Image (cartoon, coloured by chain):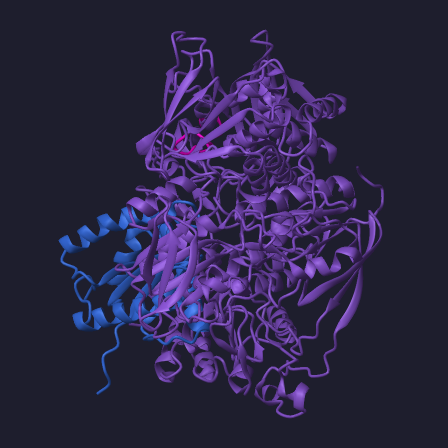
């Protein structure tokens, strides 16, 4: 039997993390094919509800990645994101979502290798956790 | 001086950050720009850097968007891999001959897939990576290069040298290799030329005592920068070249190739202290255990927020600073390095390090020197382009301007400022007119698709074998055909090639498509191209979506074709889902009132006003005092032989003679209201006698700064203690004193003012040299912490020492003590005690005069003005720019600019440069009748808005306001309103709105939900 492949949604900001993901590709750095990327202008655009929607729709994990603090293309969007996700993290824990299912990282446009490392780590963590079921509606 | 020639084109020489900025600003002013660059990519030095000081911004992250903008600008023609041969003709009508080197790869056909590189058998050292790794003869200059296409180095290619090989040709599926390509000589007719040719790093091979190239573990700072870089040859892992071990102790040696009379480099390179501190901090971040030590003469952290960075390096990162010139390096215990030096206290010492970084200086380009006669401009004694202090952007030949480090060492923001400043001069010279149209290209009228059922066309790119070699493209196409609303799906060999773009256009027509999805490479580079194709086909450009199945799929999962195909299908399905929910967007046109408001009538304000008026736009110049001139009124001499008072009189006369400038004095600002293109300002003039209201399109803040009055060293209590500014006034009729003492950094670099006031070292040396000239026997002591005569000022420091002026260092633990000498406590002489660090004992000087170099303070009134304009200040109340590196005169709020001391302390020439830069940036708006706001911006549903104000708080661009609005008949209440002219489309407000009232066009909640729900789990 084939190994179970989790599906992970990654929200990447256009200017840093998405560019970092591109750089990983251009440099041909290999990482697990489990992520599906949604490009947003800024990590500050990501409403915490998006993350919950992903889990509700059956994604096994979610990654949110933006510019390093101080590097934001929109001056301070990633700081706003950071504040939101600090709260979201606590809420997720409170409603029983395993830590590690939803992860946050900062990857710059020059960090192709780091991007690949982040994806490998997230994929590994989620493989260990197994399929996400807590928020999935079952009929 | 302007000319009436009809030639409105500009040649910009060099596509580093200065050249890119100059090209962008000139093109925005309506000039036709030719940008030539010697290397195969635009970008210059910045792509080689890992991070930038003092914010540690990732260099390529901040540069890449500018590179893309530059490459795509319709007003800019790139001539990559080209060199300037000659400039003949008259100012206003130059004939510029350039040589475009053969690339042997057709950039139109090359898809940057890298198959050729794989097959190429010849490896040579990579100059971009400072020879730290090898590359192939066919190569891309660097991974993010623009243009991204490959180039063959014909001098090393087997085919060109031995007539064999041509493997790259066989490997290239896009048929892009062209061995018949030839060098081309072309002549461009240009009205003006801007030189932005940059610098060469000093080659330290002449410093035999440091063993560069003899010892493996001695590297230059630029080599170290590549070692630090995440995309560099070591992927950001710092290891010693000799044994690939992580270095435990790293030494940085400053002033290698700078401040060195023997090497004829008697100037300071201005940037090395800061980049060494940066490299030390980053090394420490990479390897926690490493111990960096910087060996220096003076730490020259003179720029905005530099001293804070320096202090942080010491306190937070534990970087060691040792004030000593290293005499010699010897190898010790294998490849370790023993550094011998004499400490500041005169003791001979030695220390062992694992790695030594030589902080090499900036040198004039050798290539420029070779053509100086051909382009007929004069260079200074070092080989930098010669300029005059009050005309810092003009070369010696009219019509040829200079910016960036070509005219002397500069850091990135100074280069950017000088680039914009040169454009202001250039615009006046070329007499550029107001532009009628927003864009130069004409597109067919847009089809109205509102209300139509989505009809999606999906195009899946093979990218040769780049995608198709891993992903089963046909499988993806068949899958796409099954998706709802997809009317047409097909594969395509290279989606970005011209014939493919035509295929897309034909299919739009044939199938009446109203949404397009292209699954190919990355939207970051290719979305603009496809959007343009949609416009050409009469579709709104925002009805386009891309799925990234190359960079983020086939290239990243080369060994897992099945899973990669699954991923590609998901990405296509998500793209189709988003495309289905796209709707046409339009940028809101904003009319521009072509008048400028300049706040502050000091040097910067005056120069900015003149620069704008000289291009033909009206200016209101507001001054709070009764006279124009600001601080310049108190400056009577410069380093060199220019007369600032004469310059001031000339400038005021020019202002008064210019009919386009209206000057108001004794002004009190009451209110500034509005946004880019449409401001209303109310103020009283003549001390409140009359109230005025003016309308204008932009604002330039030039409110200056002031000399602080110290409360130490008996200032104000003793008649013989004075400040430099007060002293300068009296210097011409100074009695013959026996001894004068100057104390530097009074109030600067400590306590609340943790910044360098920048001008004081130069000012003290200037005044000391003047006294020496008239009274050679007067003894002058300058007590200092670091002498910061950066750049070309360094030679005056040497001159001062040659003239017998005595420099004694003090530190904060041993500040000088001042007391009256003898009985007269107010008028008599003074006794100044200071601790001589070299002799390690207290020294007492009797002086008739004590001159204090006092700190520069931001005016308190800045706080009120910042509130009116909704722009930020830094901790010390200087205005805070949009970006410390790349937007040094802009505010985040569009339409507002700054220059002069309002930004931070600076010298006369720097204020002039920044004032012209602010003018040029303002002119990029004033010269347009209408500007078009971005389409992808936020909007508010008023009925949902509860006016909580969170959006107002989180918006970094002051684009949201709470306003009273009638949202339904008889219902009037406060709701948030987005100013479309100011919104940048980050979406922070949308994600923060607790009522779900705000949404971001192009990235709406629905579009994102649909995309993430589309994935088959």
In depth, the one of B725 and B390 nearer the eye is B725
**What is the magenta range?**
B867-878
Quadrant housing residue B665? top right
In depth, the one of B808 and B175 nearer the eye is B808
The quadrant of the rendering that contains the C terminus of chain B is bottom left
Does the magenta portion include B247?
Answer: no
Up-down: is B923 above or below B535? above
Tell me if residue B874 can be seen: yes
The quadrant of the rendering that contains the N terminus of chain B is top right
Q: Is residue B694 left or right of residue A71?
A: right
**Where in the figure is residue B758, as x and y percent of width and height?**
50, 35
Up-down: is A107 above or below B26? below
**Where in the figure is residue A87, as x and y percent of width and height?**
22, 48
In depth, the one of B587 and B329 nearer the eye is B329
Up-down: is B385 above or below B214? above
Q: Residue at x 79, y 49 (%)?
A: B191
**Where in the figure is residue A125, as x and y percent of width and height?**
21, 69
Does the magenta portion include B875?
Answer: yes
Determine the colour of chain B: purple
**Where in the figure is residue B999, as x and y percent of width and height?**
41, 47
Instruction: State the predominant SS element of the stretch in magenta.
Output: loop
Q: How many numbered discs?
A: 0
Up-down: is B163 above or below A39? below
Quadrant housing residue B306? top left
Tell me if residue B57 can be seen: no
In depth, the one of B424 and A128 nearer the eye is B424
Q: Residue furthest bottom?
A: B164
Q: Residue at x 53, y 42 (%)?
A: B790
Chain blue in the figure, letter: A
Q: Is residue B114 left or right of residue B306?
A: right
């Amino acid at each position: 039997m084939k190994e179970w492949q989790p599906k992970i949604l990654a929200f990447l900001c256009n200017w840093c993390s998405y560019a970092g993901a591109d750089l990983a590709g251009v440099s041909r750095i290999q990482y697990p094919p489990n992520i599906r990327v949604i490009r947003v202008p800024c990590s500050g655009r990501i409403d915490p509800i998006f993350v919950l929607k992903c889990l509700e729709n059956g994604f096994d994990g979610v990654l949110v990645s933006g510019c390093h603090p101080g590097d934001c293309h929109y001056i301070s969007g990633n700081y706003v994101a950071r504040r939101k996700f600090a709260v979201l993290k606590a809420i997720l824990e409170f409603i029983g979502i395993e830590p590690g299912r939803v992860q946050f990282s900062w990857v710059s446009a020059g960090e192709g290798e780091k991007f690949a490392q982040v994806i490998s780590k997230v994929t590994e963590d989620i493989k260990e956790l197994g399929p996400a079921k807590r928020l999935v509606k079952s009929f | 001086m302007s000319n009436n020639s009809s030639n409105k084109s500009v040649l910009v020489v060099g596509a580093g950050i200065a050249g890119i900025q100059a090209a962008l600003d000139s093109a925005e002013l309506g000039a036709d720009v030719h940008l030539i660059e010697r290397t195969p990519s635009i970008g210059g030095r910045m792509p080689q850097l890992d991070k930038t000081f003092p914010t540690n911004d990732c260099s390529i992250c901040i540069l890449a968007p500018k590179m893309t903008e530059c490459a795509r600008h319709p007003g800019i023609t790139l001539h990559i891999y080209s060199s300037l041969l000659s400039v003949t003709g008259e100012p206003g009508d130059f004939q510029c001959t350039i040589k475009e080197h053969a690339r042997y790869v057709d950039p139109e056909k090359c898809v940057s897939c890298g198959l050729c590189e794989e097959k190429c058998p010849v490896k040579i050292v990579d100059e971009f990576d400072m020879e730290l790794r090898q590359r192939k003869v066919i190569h891309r200059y660097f991974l993010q290069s623009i243009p991204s296409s490959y180039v063959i180095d014909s001098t090393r290619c087997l085919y060109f040298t031995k007539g064999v090989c041509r493997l790259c040709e066989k490997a290239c599926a896009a048929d892009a290799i062209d061995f018949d390509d030839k060098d081309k000589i072309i002549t461009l007719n240009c009205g003006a030329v801007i030189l932005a040719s940059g610098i060469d790093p000093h080659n330290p091979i002449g410093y035999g005592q440091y063993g560069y190239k003899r010892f493996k573990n001695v590297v230059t700072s630029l080599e170290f920068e590549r070692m630090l870089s995440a995309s560099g040859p070591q992927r950001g892992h710092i290891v010693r070249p000799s044994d690939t071990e992580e270095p435990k102790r790293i030494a940085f040696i400053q002033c290698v190739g700078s401040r060195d009379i023997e090497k004829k480099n008697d100037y300071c390179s201005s940037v090395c202290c800061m980049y060494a501190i940066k490299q030390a901090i980053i090394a420490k971040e990479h390897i926690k255990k490493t111990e960096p030590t910087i060996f220096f003469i003076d730490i020259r952290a003179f720029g905005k927020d530099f001293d804070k960075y320096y202090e942080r390096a010491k306190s937070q990162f534990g970087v060691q600073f040792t004030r000593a010139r290293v005499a010699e390096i010897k190898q010790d215990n294998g490849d370790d390095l023993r550094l011998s030096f004499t400490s500041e206290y005169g003791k001979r010492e030695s220390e062992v390090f694992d790695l030594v970084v030589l902080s090499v200086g900036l040198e004039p380009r050798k290539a420029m020197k070779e053509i100086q006669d051909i382009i007929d401009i004069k260079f200074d004694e070092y080989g930098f382009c010669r300029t005059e202090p009050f005309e810092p952007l003009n070369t010696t030949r009219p019509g040829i301007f200079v910016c960036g480090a070509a005219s002397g060492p500069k850091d990135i923001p100074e280069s950017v400022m000088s680039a914009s400043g040169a454009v202001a001069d250039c615009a006046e010279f070329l007499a550029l007119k107001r532009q009628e149209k927003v864009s130069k290209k004409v597109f067919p009228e847009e089809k109205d698709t509102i209300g139509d059922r989505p009809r999606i066309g999906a195009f899946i790119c093979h990218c040769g074998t780049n995608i198709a070699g891993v992903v089963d493209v046909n499988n993806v196409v068949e899958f796409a055909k099954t998706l709802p609303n997809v009317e047409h799906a097909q594969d395509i060999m290279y989606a970005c090639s011209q014939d493919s773009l035509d295929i897309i256009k034909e299919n739009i027509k044939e199938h009446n498509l109203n949404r397009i999805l292209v699954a190919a490479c990355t939207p970051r580079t290719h979305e603009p191209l496809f959007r343009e194709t949609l416009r050409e086909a009469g579709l709104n450009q925002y009805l386009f979506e891309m799925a990234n199945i190359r960079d983020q799929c086939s290239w990243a999962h080369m060994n897992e074709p099945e899973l990669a195909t699954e991923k590609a299908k998901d990405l296509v399905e998500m793209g189709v889902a988003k495309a289905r929910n796209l709707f046409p967007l339009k940028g809101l046109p904003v009319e521009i009132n072509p008048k400028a408001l300049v706040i502050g009538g000091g040097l910067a304000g005056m120069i900015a006003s003149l620069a704008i008026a000289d291009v033909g736009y009206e200016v209101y110049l507001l001054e709070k005092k009764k006279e124009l001139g600001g601080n310049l009124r108190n400056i009577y001499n410069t380093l060199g032989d220019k007369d600032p008072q004469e310059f001031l009189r000339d400038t005021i006369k020019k202002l008064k003679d210019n009919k386009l400038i209206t000057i108001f004095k004794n002004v009190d600002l009451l209110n500034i209201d509005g946004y880019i293109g449409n401001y209303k300002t109310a103020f009283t003039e003549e001390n409140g006698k009359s109230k005025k209201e003016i309308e204008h399109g932009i604002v330039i803040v030039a409110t200056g700064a002031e000399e602080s009055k110290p409360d130490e060293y008996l200032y104000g209590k003793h008649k013989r203690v004075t400040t430099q500014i007060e002293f300068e006034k009296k210097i011409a009729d100074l009695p013959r004193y026996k001894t004068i003492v100057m104390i530097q950094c009074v109030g600067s670099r400590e306590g609340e003012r943790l910044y360098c006031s920048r001008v004081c070292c130069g000012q003290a040396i200037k005044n000391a040299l003047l006294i020496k000239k008239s009274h050679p026997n007067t003894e002058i002591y300058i007590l200092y912490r670091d002498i910061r005569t950066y750049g070309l000022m360094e030679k005056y420091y040497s001159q001062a020492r040659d003239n017998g002026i005595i420099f004694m260092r003090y530190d904060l633990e041993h500040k000088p003590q001042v007391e009256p000498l003898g009985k007269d406590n107010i008028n008599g002489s003074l006794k100044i005690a200071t601790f001589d660090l070299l002799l390690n004992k207290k020294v007492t000087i009797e002086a008739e005069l004590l001159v204090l170099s006092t700190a520069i303070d931001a005016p308190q009134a800045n706080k009120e003005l910042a509130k009116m304009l909704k722009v930020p200040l830094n901790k010390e109340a200087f205005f805070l720019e949009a970006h410390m590196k790349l937007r040094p005169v802009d505010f985040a709020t569009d339409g507002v600019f700054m220059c002069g001391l309002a930004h931070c302390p600076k010298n006369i020439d720097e204020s002039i440069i920044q004032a012209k830069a602010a003018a040029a940036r303002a002119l990029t708006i004033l010269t347009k009748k209408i500007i078009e706001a971005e389409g992808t911006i936020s909007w508010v549903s008023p009925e949902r808005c509860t006016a909580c104000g969170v959006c107002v708080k989180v918006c970094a661009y002051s684009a949201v306001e709470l306003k009273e609005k009638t949202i339904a008949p008889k219902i009037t209440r406060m709701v948030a309103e987005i100013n479309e002219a100011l919104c940048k489309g980050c979406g922070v407000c949308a994600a923060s709105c607790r009522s779900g009232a705000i949404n971001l066009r192009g990235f709406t909640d629905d579009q994102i939900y649909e995309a993430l729900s589309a994935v088959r789990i």
